[in-house]
Amino acid sequence: MKALSSLMAPATWLVILLLLITGCGHSNGIVDGLVTMDGQPVAQGEITFLPADGVGREWSAPIMAGEFHLHEIPPGDKIVRVTAMEPVPVITSTAELAQQAAAKTKSAPPREIVPANAIGNGQTVTIKAGPQPLQIKLSTPQR
């Protein structure tokens, strides 16, 4: 019985070592990216990756100062959609609310910074397994 347990110890360690080595690979994509509009980083928004074949879920990440980070996205072709709006002023006190009510003004709706028809919005990119950089360059559509 003692001989059997002494043989199992090295075999057990070998199995654990093999699991650790093979388990360290990335089967999904890890994307660190930059989104620009007309050459300038998009200050704040959201980037969404939709499966190009229409099968599976979408993956989204916030954009801050042009940068986004997305982990564990399945590899494959994805359609990229970027949305970004102007920041909306926030009323922070009852005095501000009273001023706005007295002036009978309404806040204007936020303006799109990245329109849905921006050149480059809706492009298809290929996500690979493992870490990868991705740059999304958008530009104002022609009128």
Image (spheres, grey):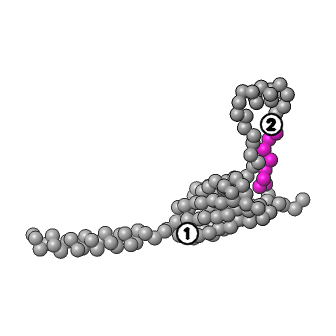
Please name the amino acid that badge 1 sits on: Pro
Please identify the dominant SS of the magenta region. loop
Please name the amino acid that badge 2 sits on: Ser
Which SS class for mark 1?
strand
Of residue 59 and residue 105, the one placed in the foreground of this image is: 105
The residue segment tinted magenta is: 108-115
Q: Residue at x 83, y 60 (%)?
A: 140
Can residue 50 be seen here? The reply is no
User: Where, quadrant-wise, is the C terminus in this rendering?
Assistant: bottom right
* Residue 55 sits in quarter: bottom right
* Label 1: few (<14), some (14–19) or many (≥20) C-alpha neighbours in 10 Å: some
Mark carried by residue 107: 2
Mark carried by residue 8: none
Of residue 13 and residue 44, the one placed in the foreground of this image is: 44
Mark carried by residue 131: 1
Viewed as shown, does residue 91 lie left or right of 74? right
Viewed as shown, does residue 128 lie left or right of 122? left
Q: Residue at x 74, y 46 (%)?
A: 87
Which SS class for mark 2?
loop
Q: Earlier in the sequence, mark 1 or mark 2?
A: 2
Viewed as shown, does residue 117 lie left or right of 8? right
